[in-house]
Image (tube, helix red, strand yellow):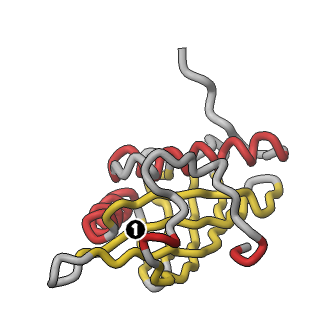
Amino acid sequence: MSNPPIVPPFTAETACKKVKIAQDLWNTKTPEKVALAYTEDTVWRNRDCFMKGREEVIEFLRKKWEKENGYRLRKELFAFMENKIAVQFFYEWYEVKPDGAKQWYRCYGLEDWTYAEDGRMKKRQMSGNDVPITEEERWFKDGVDVNSFPISDKHL
């Protein structure tokens, strides 16, 4: 038996749960599965890309995860009210350079989410910045629990 969806209005507890559910879903890197958490007519802004509808979201996510190898994400609740949630996030990924070397990046960003009455997201806006990092600077290496890695004030 599956759990009922978390729907607005949100409480601190349900907003935190919604954030971690989204984090876990995105960490699957399965565009079709991720897209089901959004309304059919969802509207997105992701950096400089604007999308409307699940099909555009699926295509965007396919391209994203073709480029962003080794993707690992952590989301944290920033603020919430009634049917809105704001999230701070961090994720790491790498690209393969022409010489075969891996260049790692960490993306620091914020999202604001607006939900429909059924608990699916109808609007998502994301702003993020990719910062080159070394292998040694990575947080989310294999075997690391993204939820328990200590993130210092320097990075918040």
Q: Mark 1 points at which residue?
A: 93
* Amino acid type, residue under disc 1 in the picture: Trp
Is 83 left or right of 46, judged from the image as shown?
Answer: right
| Secondary structure found at label 1 | strand
* Place of residue 27 in the rendered image (x, y in percent of width and height, measured from the top left): 45, 50
* Place of residue 142 in the rendered image (x, y in percent of width and height, measured from the top left): 43, 50
* Place of residue 124 in the rendered image (x, y in percent of width and height, measured from the top left): 57, 66
Residue at the top extreme, as displayed: 1
Tell me which residue sits at (72%, 64%) in the image. Answer: 86
Q: In this view, does 145 lie above or below 154?
A: above
Q: In this view, does 73 lie above or below 11?
A: below
Question: Toward which corner of the image does residue 6 lie, by quadrant?
Answer: top right
Tell me which residue sits at (78%, 72%) in the image. Answer: 153
Closer-to-camera residue (146/24) = 146
Report the number of numbered marks: 1
| Image quarter of the N terminus | top right
Residue at the left extreme, as displayed: 99
Tell me which residue sits at (73%, 57%) in the image. Answer: 77
* Place of residue 57 in the rendered image (x, y in percent of width and height, measured from the top left): 38, 62
- Categorize mark 1 by other alpha carbons within 10 Å: few (<14), some (14-19), many (20+): many
